[in-house]
Each structure stands twice: as structure tokens, then as C-alpha cells.
Image: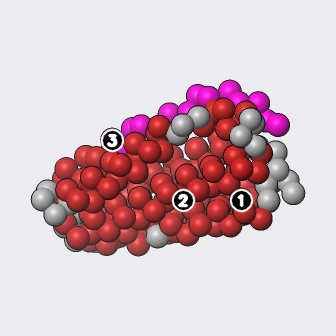
Amino acid sequence: MGKGRLEAFSDGVIAIIITIMVLDLKVPHETSLAALRPVVPPLLCYILSFMFVGIYWNNHHHLLHATQKVNGAVLWANLHLLFWLSLVPFATGWMGENHFSSVTVAAYGAVLLMAAIAFTILSRALIVFHGEGSSLATAIGDDRKGKTSVALYVIAIACARVNPWISVALYVCVALIWFVPDRRLERAPAP
């Protein structure tokens, strides 16, 4: 089957995720700059999460660019990814409302870790469907970015107990790794 429906559905879900996150931000009732102080932690969480969701959307697009068709396994793998991404607004709100407490930073990392694993599963499902010799398989290669991300998330979750800001810094590092989509995927010809 064609990939158009999967792309359209995924785009819609990701748009809803971003909308939910922004609607969760509380607007101060006062007009002074001091009134913004309590909003800073949730706003920082929103910015971080917006970056992550945007990065997933962008890389998802590039991943599907290198494909023409999908099968049932790919559809389920994609739903698995969307499930974990749909938890980002909850984890974002919890972390922001609790000012980056250890437990909430670790929980946020757990959601990001599971999304990273789900993206890897989706990539593998597409490779299996298109074949190990496909342009997609060649472009993904040994998936160093994916493996590095998973390792950094695991380290960040462990660091949350010691210092949540180390974890947040590691989350930002992962975002920077993925900010530019894999050039090999951009250049991969659609089958």
C-alpha cells in the first residue's frame, strides 16, 4: 500500500501533540515581567519538547521520503512511535509544573527513550519491508545516531537522580544530534 495515508495521519497526530503542549501553557493574569517568572519552567519545557516533536516530524518525513510503500508491520511500528510521542505533552507538563524535579526529568527521559526506540523499530520495519539492499537501508547504515541517542537517554535518566540539569543538558545534546536530518536520507532516492 502507498505511504500517503500514513504520512497524513502522522502529520495530523504530531500537529495535535504540539497544539496540546501549547494549550497547556498558563498565561499570567498580570502584565508585569515579574508575572512571567512562574511561567519560565513550563515555557522552557515547552521549547525543549517542541524541538523534539519537530525533530521527530522532520526525520519521520525524511525517513518516509526514502520509501514508496508501507505494510502492516510498518503501520504498527508507526503507531508505536506516535503513542510515545503522544505522551510528550504529559511528560512536558509534569516536568514544567514541578520545575525540573528529578523524578519528572527522569520520566521525561523515559518517554524520549521509548520514542527513540520506537523510531528505531519503525526504521527497521521499513528496511525489512524494502530490503537490506534498498537505498533506505544504505542511508540508515549502522544507525549511529539512533544508538547514540538511546545511550545518552539511558545515561540522562540515571543522572536525573544526581542532578536533573545534567539530564536536561544530555537531552539537548540528543536534540542537537538530530536537528539536522541524516543527509544520506535526504539524498536517498525514493524507490
Quadrant of the drawing holding the C terminus: top right
Q: Amino acid at mark 1?
A: Val
- Picture quarter containing residue 102? bottom left
Q: Classify mark 2: residues with Cα within 10 Å, few (<14), some (14-19) or many (20+).
A: many
Residue pictured at 69% horizontal, 46% vertical: 127
The foreground one among 47 and 69 is 69
Q: Classify mark 3: residues with Cα within 10 Å, few (<14), some (14-19) or many (20+).
A: some
Where disc 3 sits, the SS reads helix
Instruction: Say which residue label 1 marks.
Output: 74
Residue 71: give x, y in percent of width and height: 79, 59
Would you say residue 181 sits in the magenta stretch? yes
Mark 2 → mark 3, Cα distance in angstroms: 19 Å
Instruction: Say which residue label 3 marks.
Output: 173
Residue pictured at 68% horizontal, 27% vertical: 187
- Picture quarter containing residue 100? bottom left
Residue pictured at 48% horizontal, 54% vertical: 116
Q: Classify mark 1: residues with Cα within 10 Å, few (<14), some (14-19) or many (20+).
A: many
Mark 3 → mark 1, Cα distance in angstroms: 28 Å
Q: Is residue 62 above or below residue 87?
A: above
Instruction: Say which residue label 2 marks.
Output: 118
**Mark 3 or mark 2, which is nearer the start of the sequence?**
2
Q: Magenta: predominant secondary structure element?
A: helix
Q: Is residue 68 left or right of residue 142?
A: right
Give the extent of the magenta segment: 173-191
Quadrant of the drawing holding the N terminus: bottom right
